[in-house]
Image: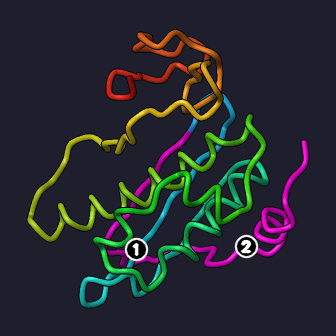
Amino acid sequence: MMYSKTVMEHFRNPRNVGVIEDADGVGEVGNPICGDMMTIYLKINEEKIGDIKFQTFGCGSAIAVSSMLTELAMGKSIEEAKKITNKDVAAALEGLPKNKLHCSNLGADALHLAIQDYEDRKAGITRPEPRRPIEKHVHVHGEKCLCPYCDTEIMESTTFCKACQSDLNDEH
């Protein structure tokens, strides 16, 4: 498994690591199979991301994804940050090995959850359970359909991945 120089740089020298104690939005995601856990903290100033920090427990790819994600989102308007996708993060890292692409999903999902949390707080909405934003499922590995969380091959009509125990109802 080969990592790009950019992935290795962000793994060895991650940017924006930490916690924002009085965060305006917090997004937390995890993958039960690989053990990666990401939390993104946002501080919003005039509808722009004025500060962004992360805490990630996971592999080198997960740490690199978190670091790159914060670099991509810093200074962006809320609307611009909402458009950051897992593909954007992977591309900025100059690619990830196939079995690590799910890490980029986690990063984009955590950012989108943090933005949703910020918007909910601003609107006075309290959500009982965290929600995962779901990108439309796109085949990026040819004709095979892979679980977006653990890269296990699945049938197109699958609604639950047995390998990682993820609900895929909104995925396919």
- Residue linked to disc 1: 42
Left or right: 18 with respect to 48?
right
Say what secondary structure mark 1 lies in. Answer: strand
Left or right: 119 with respect to 93?
left
Identify the image quadrant of residue 80.
bottom left
Say what secondary structure mark 2 lies in. Answer: loop
Which disc, if any, is residue 14? 2
Q: Quadrant of the C terminus?
A: top left
Viewer-nearest residue: 131 or 129? 131
Identify the image quadrant of residue 3.
bottom right
Residue at the (34%, 21%) spot, across then down = 169
> How many numbered badges does the structure rendering display?
2
Q: Earlier in the sequence, mark 1 or mark 2?
A: 2
**Does residue 35 sit above or below 108 in this rendering?**
above
Residue 140: x %, y % from top left = 59, 35
Residue at the (27%, 60%) spot, across then down = 117
Q: Residues within 10 Å of mark 1 (few under 14, many from 20)?
A: many
Residue 162: x %, y % from top left = 55, 11
In the displayed image of the protein, which residue is found farthest to the left?
A: 124
User: Is residue 88 in the magenta section?
Assistant: no
Say which amino acid is labelled 2: Pro
Residue at the (43%, 77%) spot, across then down = 21
| Mark 1 to mark 2 CA distance (whole Å) | 17 Å
Say which amino acid is labelled 1: Leu
Which segment did they paint magenta? 1-30
Viewer-nearest residue: 16 or 168? 168
Q: Quadrant of the N terminus?
A: top right
